[in-house]
Amino acid sequence: MTRQALTGSDTNLGNLLHLIVESCIARDLIDTSAYFWPGYVVPCNVAEVPDSSLIKYCPWSNFMQGAPLTMSLQNALINIPAPSVTELKKLNHLALHGSDEERSASSKILCGASLDQGWCIQEHVVHIVVRLLSPQLTLGSPRTGDANFYLSHMHMLATLLSCLSHDGVIHILSLYGLVPDVVTALMPLCEAFGSFPPPSPNQSSTGEEVSPYSVFSFAFLFLLRLCNNYGPDKEFYASSCGGPVRPDLKLDFFLLTRNSRIQKDTALSNRYYVNSVADPFHDLRCHPVYVDSFPNLRACISGSSERISGDEIEGLPHYPAWDLLEAVPLVLDAIFNACAYGPVSSRDLTIGLKGLVDLLPASVAAIIRYFIVEITRGTWKTVPLNGIDWPTPAEALNFFHLEVKEVLERVSVHVQNWYPQDVEPMLPLPLAAFLSLSITFKLDKKSEYISSIIGRTLGNYLLNCPWPIMLTICALWIQKARMWHDFIVLLGARSHFTNDKDAVRQLLSSCFKSFLDAGSMVSNFTTSSNGVVDLLGESVCDRLALRPGILFLSTCHLFRGSPRYFSDMICKLVVEWTCKLADEWTSGGPKQLKFGQTSLAATICAVRRVAILGASLLCMAGRSSLVQYLFEETAPTFLLSTDEERSKQTSWISSMLVGYVISYLLFFSAAIVWGVQAGTGPDKFRGSDMSPYAIKNHLSFIAKATEGNIALRCDPALWKAHVSSFVGLIVRLAPSWVPSTKLDALKNISSSLRRCHEHDLALSLLELGGISAIEAALESLS
């Protein structure tokens, strides 16, 4: 690798080339002096450099030489990644043993450019910051109620939590798989600081007040954010009766993930001698952690009042954070009744709520829970958003709904339920109060740990509320947060697909049309990839210029309704487009061959891609549940019935291609969610492997139909193509699906294949049936 190849023409920091080269430098695979670009931080212990003019100033050298952490030096260290692990070790030491100002400064520096730009040291930094969240692991294991220990690290923890709660940093932690470790570290902080009384607030070097309330609020809201954004899918923690399980099981999920990893790492370290270079902080003591160790946190998350009171903690006075959180619903109920029927004005209500959040930011979680419960009950009166008592969205309402309509019409989705004209917007009292509270917070990094919780709650509510209410809320927020304009418009567009089946049908049709209908469908498949561009677009520069595929990917998890509707709709679209391909082939199509007709092989290839698109959309919309319904209901129903009007106009090629496409749709759907080998599909992590069951049942269905035990009403050519194609796909690509099928079913299918002159396929099927099928295979050869 030459110097010219390394340097290249791109001088932007942080691209993939720099990531690769810095990783190689960190592992001594290439020499440091061989690679420079403007702004590159060179380790200060490098003796010789090609051009010293590229290195104007190295604040890390001053830091290592003992310079005090002045504000100017802090800003320089925050904006420049650390050159090596040596500097990180010193920062880690200061964060644990320095003065309050040094602890805060070290935490900010660790969470600066070293974390989000220092590619060669990032893996060290993420482990350091997670360990700093658990000072009890580094400096001992105090009991949860040891106030002095935790309070001595209060400044460091407050700064660290405020820096880690930004979206970019959370994403980095998730990429390294450390979200379970962060959740585990946050739980004792919530339990401890939520039980401490608030002493007189201490001011940090930046003038910010630090108290147990602020540390508890940072940790508690950070914990809720991780549980909501990175918790298991609903399919994972669904109970056996089909309903959701308690929210505190999300904590169990993270703890079990972390504990199992510790157990595995311990077993490996006992088996092999590992000299860890990648993580010099890996020798800290790690023990399994369980949610029962944190009774107050568990009670708060699960919504119970059964928790440890302040009187049971020795030596502590009343009113710790847990007590305040427990009292918030009672306070809210009183002031809401006073606002609805008494002397409290809407302005005083909003000011009071804002004061409560300023006192204890974590109370926003209790406020949100109260609002959700009261809005769901629907017993409160509605209030007019007239701009006098409550803020009004009138200024942006008309423009907003026109923008949403335009976004939907770009993907050929037309809806009619727009906001009625000349009607004053109205909302239930709790919702109006929540909106008034939400727009009082500043949209900056300092308040992100609060605004992110509020934003997610509003986003989830908007996707489930009636259309007029959604328009009102979004229009009000567009006036407040201009920077979120595109996001709010897209949120309004997505909300249409929550309960509107006709909008879902139009979006699915648009996906097929954009992918398949580009001139001649066969020529599109064989000569270019324009269908993919039309489906997904070429870039995401303009967030509002969406293609139907991108909108589908962002809304498919919102679809509601029975599995039958989506499975039947996708199957119907797949068959319709296959019939169009058959009609194109029959009519001659484009003159691609010397004989003046489109190749049948090219048409079959196009049919296969139609099925791949249908399978992809089906699996994205419902994963294993929809695929299982496809096997058990949709496909058998289609094969057992017939469309009288269509059958009169169907040619033999149309029937054959439809038989092929049904086989492809079934096979590709099963392969995507279950894998072609045992335990290889993505759903293996959800504790379900339905592939043997579904495939076995469909092969048994084919066997019964070939015996005449099931009356088939579809075209014989369609059935023959389906059987030979589906069995052929399994034999060639997924042989592990065959052994679970009953031997009698395999014999019947094999006999049917031989009658259709598919002797090799029939023999291959029996060979995969195991030892019990060998005799039948020998009989077929005689």
Image (spheres, helix red, strand yellow):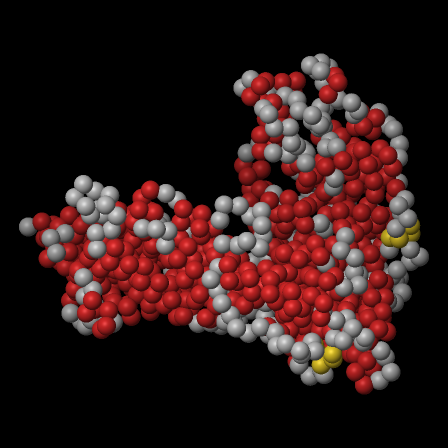
Q: Would residue 249 appear left or right of 308 to someone viewing this image?
A: left
At 91% from the left edge and 55% from the top edge, which residue is drawn? 201
- Is residue 86 something that shows in the picture? yes
At 15% from the left edge and 56% from the top edge, which residue is drawn? 753
- Closer-to-camera residue (200/598): 598
At 78% from the left edge and 22% from the top edge, which residue is drawn? 56
Picture mark count: 0
Most distant residue in the bottom direction: 341
Residue 4: percent from left, percent from top: 58, 19
Q: Would residue 487 appear left or right of 782 to someone viewing this image?
A: right
At 62% from the left edge and 18% from the top edge, which residue is drawn? 34
Residue 630: percent from left, percent from top: 35, 64
| Rendered image quadrant of residue 116 | top right
Most distant residue in the right direction: 200
Residue 740: percent from left, percent from top: 29, 57
Where 290 sits versus 594, above or below? Answer: below
- Is residue 684 something that shows in the picture? no
- Closer-to-camera residue (762/566): 566
Q: Would residue 765 appear left or right of 207 to someone viewing this image?
A: left
- Closer-to-camera residue (572/17): 572
Residue 486: percent from left, percent from top: 63, 56
